[in-house]
Amino acid sequence: MNQLQENEFEKFTRFDDAMPLAPGREKPDVINPDNPHWNSFTALAMWVFSLFLMGVIVYVSIIVYAFFGGISMSEIGEMARVNDVNLIVVNIAAMLPVHLATILVTWLLVSRFGKQPFFETMGWDFGSIKYSFYSYLLIYSGVAVALLVVGNLIALPFGKPENELERILQSSRAALYITAFLATFTAPLVEEVIYRGIMFPAFQRSFGTIPAVGFVTFLFTLIHVPQYYPSVGVILVICVLSLTLTIIRAVTKNLLPSFVVHTVFNGIQAVLLVASPYISSLEATESGFFHF
């Protein structure tokens, strides 16, 4: 790897090294992403709190929408029952502040309120074997593409029963665009930090690698079931995705590789969804596997 490539690689993977230490901030001599300062109980509590945070912010967003729209809560209930387009957009748009708030809370935990470098603690690196940045990007993008191909093969025998995510995507172009944005630019970061950045290393230390991989895979799949039920094939694909991402995290001992795979996996589908009205052959892509 030449000097220019090395510098470019370092800029992408070493955010914390480029940031000055805040007053009172101490950088530990050795930071090991597999040996975090939080325990399994704290990791599980963070997962539960992230779900609680999502519920609160979405509910508050609906109340604000109802207040400024002069809509009663009983009318909101009826709008939800008939899948009102505007209410769907409000629900989806509320996920952006949910993701931002979740990242803030996880930053407070991981960085000890700014006293420890966040990205380094998470394992924001590609691992001990140093290739060029573009080589890593090509390798992990290839993994994402392979997952998409395998996912379609897994889902094929189960058909395409309509699920909640499909109803959201088909409700309006606004809902589709917002979903595509979230699935590409915020959801992968939030989910990787929660599941494989915070939960996995804590569970691995407490219970071992294999149980930790299984537990994280199960929780990640479980939280996405409401989006995809009754599409059993798609739920199986999400399970395979989670298992693959968690194994990548376990093997590389870093979070960045699974984040790249996750982002490319969602991003490819987002591009296809946005382009589908303009390319007739892509009409079938509206039953994607991405999530937010």
Image (tube, rainbow, N blue to C red):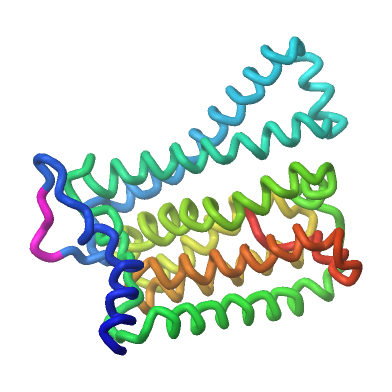
Q: Is residue 174 left or right of residue 170?
A: left
In this view of the protein, which residue sits in the foreground, 194 or 186?
186
Q: How many marks?
A: 0
Give the farthest residue toward the bottom: 1
Residue 208 visible to an observer of this rendering = no
Q: Which image quadrant is residue 15 in?
A: bottom left
Q: Is residue 170 left or right of residue 228?
A: right
Above or below — where is 291 with respect to 109?
below
Above or below — where is 99 with respect to 233?
above
* Residue at point 57%, 32% (across, down): 55
The image position of residue 264, as x and y in percent, is: 57, 69
Give the farthest residue toward the front: 4
Q: Which image quadrant is residue 211 in?
A: bottom left
* Residue at point 29%, 80% (across, down): 6
Look at the image and give the residue range highlighted in magenta: 26-30
* Residue at point 46%, 40% (across, down): 100
Q: Is residue 27 magenta?
A: yes
The image position of residue 273, as x and y in percent, is: 76, 60
The image position of residue 177, as x and y in percent, is: 71, 49
Q: Which quarter of the rendering shows the N terminus?
A: bottom left
Residue 50 visible to an observer of this rendering = yes
Q: Which image quadrant is residue 254 in?
A: bottom left
Q: Main secondary structure of the magenta part?
A: loop
* Residue at point 83%, 69% (across, down): 158
Q: Is residue 153 left or right of residue 34?
A: right
The image position of residue 74, as x and y in percent, is: 78, 14
In this view of the protein, which residue sits in the foreground, 214 or 286?
286
Q: Is residue 186 magenta?
A: no
